[in-house]
Amino acid sequence: MIEQKSLTIPKNAIITIAGTVGVGKSTLTQALAKKLNFKTSLEKVDHNPYLEKFYHDFERWSFHLQIYFLAERFKEQKNIFESGGGFVQDRSIYEDTGIFAKMHADKGTMSKVDFKTYTSLFEAMVMTPYFPHPDVMIYLEGDLNSILKRIEERGRDMELQTDISYWQEMHTRYENWISGFNACPVLRLNIDEYDLLEDESSLDLVIERIGKIIEETRN
């Protein structure tokens, strides 16, 4: 029965996973890809020429960093489509403009002119019928306390040293962003409704819901 549910996902499907830090995007990406025999598309930061500079001077490098991310994610999306799909993505291209670039613009660490230029480029590249949008975006959500608990449990120093106000702001920004998102179908999945570490079978219900959304939108 489990295998039949898995077969409802087309082999050329593109599934992207979105959500704030700590919701388990990478864990779900790996688990779904393994279950569906899909490939993974993971965020690449090792060779980013702007990342270190950005952390030393937000205002000087925020625009450069976001342009770099946009170009890299666009190329990755194009490669996924041209290779025939069958991918699960960890983080979407849409979050860069809807969350991070907007946050810099709101806080003044990106000028209004740079933000307008970036947004115009994003819309020309991504928000068109020609861009290979995912078949479904899985938006991982949960209450702030659950997310903070996960951040604490994985114990990354940089995250543990970050003031709680930052996580509160990101949580609010993500919720506001997803409420108006319509670039592709969305499956909102609460992180407290499944537990991949304790109950692997909880993934089967997630796959069933993904399959239903893709079937509805493709037919």
Image: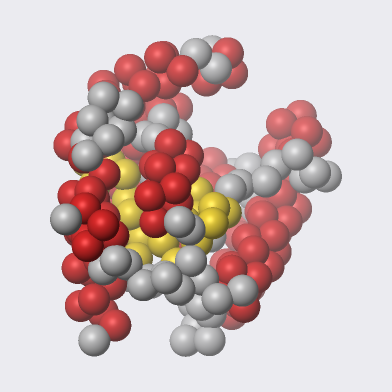
Up the image or down, 123 lies above or below 41; here it is below
- From the top left corner, tell me how far across and down residue 197 is, in percent: 32, 26
- Decide if residue 161 is on the left or right side of residue 194: right
Q: Position of residue 71 (x, y in %)?
A: 70, 64
* Residue shown at the point (26%, 68%) measured from the top left: 8
**Residue at (40, 42) in percent of width and height:** 31
Which colour style is shown? Answer: secondary structure
Rendered position, 78 above or below 137? below
Q: How many marks?
A: 0
Residue 85 in sight from this viewpoint = yes
Question: Horizontal placement of 60 versus 146: left or right?
Answer: right
In the rendered image, which quarter is residue 167 located in?
A: top left
Residue at the image position 18 percent from the left and 49 percent from the top: 205
Q: Quick check: 99 left or right of 158?
A: left
Q: Quick one: 51 or 72, which is closer to the camera?
A: 72
**In which quadrant will I find the N terminus?**
bottom left
Front-lying residue, 46 or 33: 33
- Decide which of 121, 126 is in the foreground and name it: 126
Quadrant showing the C terminus: bottom left
In x, y percent, where is residue 145? 26, 21
Residue 12 in picture, x, y percent from top left:
45, 73
For residue 114, above or below residue 44? below
The answer to whether residue 170 of the structure is visible from this angle is no
Q: Within the image, what quadrant is residue 210 found in?
A: bottom left
> In which image quadrant can residue 173 be found?
top left
Q: In the depicted view, which residue is nearer to us: 40 or 146?
A: 40
Q: Is residue 34 above or below residue 7?
A: above
